[in-house]
Amino acid sequence: MKSTSPNILTPQQWTALDRMKAMAFGGRKRGTLGGSLVSDMVSLQKTLILCGNCQGKFDYRRSGYYSVYRYEHQPVLGPCDVCRTQITGNDGRLFLHEEVRPEAWATPDEQKQRRATQRQVADPQYRRRR
């Protein structure tokens, strides 16, 4: 039997909150493996937080990631993205994707260079004194 009632389509009115909810990453669903979540996050170039047990299984160099702890010894607190255990102490590691890292984190060399540039901009006599 055919339906003769017309379909009325109305455009969706998206608010800023709706757009932000759509961009949010919900995390790993129950019943899925942690490794599949990591591979999904790597393909999306998301930041990873891994505990001491899970970080040995992740090859961050091959995946194009930057280990903040390896170069700057900054521990991380929060839940592990793979096993969901709460990270306390110094065993947590933060991994940033190389394409995102310049926007999110500055290495000590970059910070030093920025400070020198700020001094030059703030004090025009700085260059002449050196």
Image (cartoon, rainbow, N blue to C red):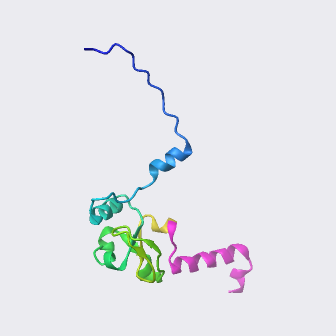
Which residue lies at the image location 52% right of the left edge and 35% below the top edge? 13
| Foreground pick, 71 / 58 | 58
Query: On the rendered structure, is 116 left or right of 28?
Result: right
| Residue depicted at x 55% and y 41% | 15
Magenta stretch: dominant SS? helix
Measuring 53% from the left and 76% from the top, which residue is drawn there?
110
Nearest the camera: 48 or 81? 81
Say left or right for 46 vs 102: left
| Stretch of the chain drawn in magenta | 104-130
Quadrant for the C terminus, please: bottom right
Horizontal and vertical percent position of residue 124: 73, 76
Residue 97 visible in the snapshot: no
| Image height of 106 relative to 20, above or below | below
> Residue sitting at 51 percent across and 50 percent down?
20
Magenta residue check for 108: yes
Answer with left or right where residue 75 lies relative to residue 125. Answer: left
Most distant residue in the left direction: 1
